[in-house]
Image: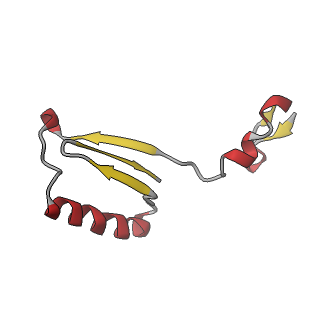
Amino acid sequence: MTAGPQNETPRPERLRRLDRIFPQVPIYFVTACTFGRKALLARREVHEAYIRFIYRGEEHGAYVGSYVLMPDHLHFGS
């Protein structure tokens, strides 16, 4: 067995490559929907506000790497 991220948990030999695949900082993939799936997000002012949120996220420890903004939901990864 080899140690996992930050030497926390030993990994079986078959899982040792996970240390190279997954960084020590977690990556999240998030989907959020509007209430009632109402098409509220497909507007320029919403997209501009979301971009402002992305740029200020680092101030709060949140990083958005990529996103898809749909009329009634959004996907993003950090």
On the question of residue 65 being in view, the answer is yes
Residue that appears at 66% across and 52% down: 24
Left or right of residue 61, residue 7 in this image: right
In the figure, residue 63 lies in which quadrant? bottom left
Residue 37 versus residue 53: which sits nearer the camera? 37
User: What residue is shown at x 42% (from left), y 56% (from top)?
Assistant: 66
Give left or right: position of 47 versus 68.
left
Q: Quadrant of residue 71?
A: top left
Measured along the vertical axis of the image, is residue 67 above or below residue 52? above
Quarter that holds the N terminus: top right
Q: Is residue 73 left or right of residue 14?
A: left
Residue 22 position, x and y percent, is 66, 46
Q: In the image, residue 31 lies at what x, y percent? A: 34, 41
Residue 12 seen in this snapshot: no
Q: Colour scheme used in the picture?
A: secondary structure
The correct choice, above or below, for 59 with respect to 62 in the image is: below
Q: How many marks?
A: 0
Residue 51, given in percent of the width and then of the height, sits at: 29, 65
Q: Which residue is more in the foreground, 74 or 59?
A: 74
Residue found 72% across the figure and 40% down from its top: 18
Compare residues 29 and 1 and report the one nearer the observer. 29
Q: Quadrant of residue 54?
A: bottom left
Q: Position of residue 13 (x, y in %)?
A: 85, 31
Q: Residue at x 29, y 41 (%)?
A: 32
